[in-house]
Image (cartoon, helix red, strand yellow):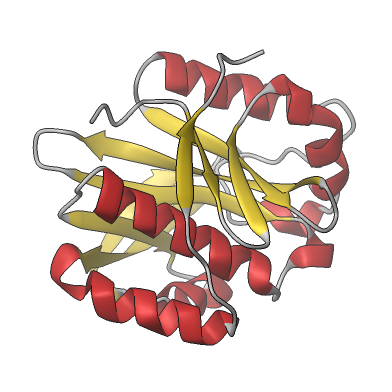
Amino acid sequence: MDFFNRVQIEGTQVVLEPLSLRHLDDLATAGADESIWRWLPSAHHLPGSMTAFIESALAAYGGRTALPFATIDRAAKKAVGSTRFHHIDTEHRRLEIGVTWIGTAFQRSYVNTEAKLLQLWYAFEVLKCRRIEFKADAHNKKSIAAISRLGATQEGFFRKHMLYADGRNRDNVYFSIIDDEWPVVRAQLQAKLGYAVAPVATEAAAAR
């Protein structure tokens, strides 16, 4: 299985579509709140800035360093955020789930929980990954709590690990879920959602 196959991952209320410029208008609306970008590498809340976000993600895909998705809410029939697989190591069958953001109207809802379930399912059961990683800014208590609620294990604290575009330092906290833990994590995520999710992955058309 090629880790960089363009796939659409469908769930019950959420669909992960390969990110493309056709999602631009939806994502520009969803990402218009400046607070969304505080803990991300660069901000894209200003008018016209979402194009750069999508084009950068597509460049990473072209360079085989990331597989980016638009997060689609079925009921709203629109993209409400974005996420991706990156730091992909095919030899050792591991990757990181990151650069995840969701519009404020859909935060603290089923969207992120089901999206993570879909990503973890695809990574563990289709790509046969052994390990999935997550990281969060050490000051981002909300993100750290959310990753912990997934059932991930905190592993380490990386000092002066990154710089934000504005020059701020970023210390990172690292987490992981390994394949042995996936059945329990999957059951816990299903219980949190309170409805059945039977993920399906299909090959997607070329980017536009």
**Residue 37 visible from this viewpoint:** yes
Query: For residue 148, which quarter of the picture?
Result: bottom left
Q: Is residue 166 above or below residue 98?
A: above
Where's residue 127, x and y in %?
A: 25, 42
**Residue 149 visible from this viewpoint:** no
Q: Is residue 128 above or below residue 102?
A: above
Q: How many marks?
A: 0
In the rendered structure, the answer to whether residue 90 lies left or right of residue 46 reads left
Where's residue 22, x and y in %?
A: 76, 23
| Residue sitting farthest toward the left | 92
Residue at horizontal 40 percent and vertical 51 percent from the top:
97
Where's residue 161, x and y in %?
A: 33, 50
Residue at horizontal 51 percent and vertical 75 percent from the top:
146
Query: For residue 50, which quarter of the picture?
Result: top right
Q: Nearer the viewer, residue 147 or 16?
A: 16
In the rendered structure, the answer to whether residue 184 lies left or right of residue 81 reads left
In the rendered structure, the answer to whether residue 124 lies left or right of residue 54 reads left
Where's residue 159, x and y in %?
A: 29, 59
Q: Nearer the viewer, residue 199 or 207?
A: 199
Q: Nearer the viewer, residue 35 or 19?
A: 19
Q: Quadrant of the C terminus?
A: top right
Q: Quadrant of the N terminus?
A: top left
In the rendered structure, the answer to whether residue 114 lies left or right of residue 184 reads right
Residue at horizontal 9 percent and vertical 41 percent from the top:
92
Query: For residue 28, which quarter of the picture?
Result: top right
Q: Is residue 107 above or below residue 91?
A: below
Residue at horizontal 26 percent and vertical 75 percent from the top:
183
